[in-house]
Amino acid sequence: TQSTRPQRLLHAVQKNATRGDPRSVVKAIDNFCRQKEWAMNVGDEKGCILDSVVSEVNPVTVLELGTYCGYSTVRIASLLPPRAKIITLEFNPDYAKIARQVIAWAGLEDKIQVVEGPSGEWIPKMKEQFGVKTFDLVFLDHWKDRYLPDTKLLEDCGLLRKGSILLADNVICPGTPDYLEYVRNSPRYKSQYFKSHLEYTKAEDGLEKSVFLG
Ligand SMILES: O=C(NCCCCCn1ccc2cnccc21)c1cc(-c2ccc(F)cc2)cc(O)c1O
Ligand SMILES: [Mg+2]
């Protein structure tokens, strides 16, 4: 039976990356996507912006919405202090299965919890299920029409604190117009746009970093 793109991406990691070396896993995925098959990882250009935000925030609790194959999960986790944890939500069980194997190859399974299901159902259960108080950093990379409702849900569930950072991928391509309008005009956020390009292409895209003001 025909393999899927995530399966081919995983094989490229297992073939070209060193076990326990997260940076080599990131490199192997970027090379696969540049040379063989495009895939919707945040990629190396936006990935460097992600790295700088993570290093600046030094988060202890991270929520990622949209795991896919675990590229950004590995990128973030490789920069976290020892006790820090990421909860990453993936709707598609096949993607989650691949992501767990990519994360294991990077040797980062102790810092990462991959949770399967829709954000709308899981966000209200974060406190009781995972003992989370608030998130220091949220990376939004899932259905683009869920960025806004899930941000409001995070607020309503008390999962954001003064200074929590929201970092959103794809605010230009595919685009999240209602989310951008909200974080850029709400008095509860201080927002900043990092112009970049859609992963592995010349098309414009960017990340929006928004600080929750409480
Ligand atoms: O669609 C994108 N990502 C989302 C994938 C599905 C997420 C599903 N999901 C995961 C967790 C979760 C929790 N609750 C509900 C749903 C949930 C995406 C697309 C492009 C893209 C594609 C084609 C093109 F021509 C240009 C750009 C580029 C990106 O970087 C992207 O991220
Ligand atoms: Mg994305």
Image (spheres, helix red, strand yellow):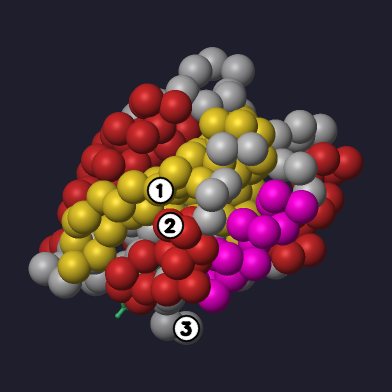
Task: Characterize the local packing of mark 2: few (<14), some (14-19) or many (20 or more) Cα atoms within 10 angstroms.
Answer: some
Amino acid carrying mark 3 in the image: Thr
- Is 87 left, or right, of 206 in this rendering? right
Q: Where is residue 121 drawn, in percent x and y?
A: 78, 63
Q: In this picture, which residue range is highlighted in magenta?
A: 141-156
- Cα distance in 3D space between marks 3 and 2: 47 Å
Of the numbered discs in the image, which one, if any, rests on residue 95?
A: none
Q: Nearer the viewer, mark 3 or mark 1?
A: 1
Q: Which residue is label 2 attached to?
A: 184
Q: Which residue is label 3 attached to?
A: 1
Is residue 17 in view?
no
Task: Characterize the local packing of mark 3: few (<14), some (14-19) or many (20 or more) Cα atoms within 10 angstroms.
Answer: few
- Cα distance in 3D space between marks 3 and 1: 47 Å
Q: Which residue is label 1 attached to?
A: 191
Amino acid carrying mark 2 in the image: Arg
Q: Where is residue 175 drawn, in percent x and y?
A: 37, 73
Q: Secondary structure at mark 1?
A: strand
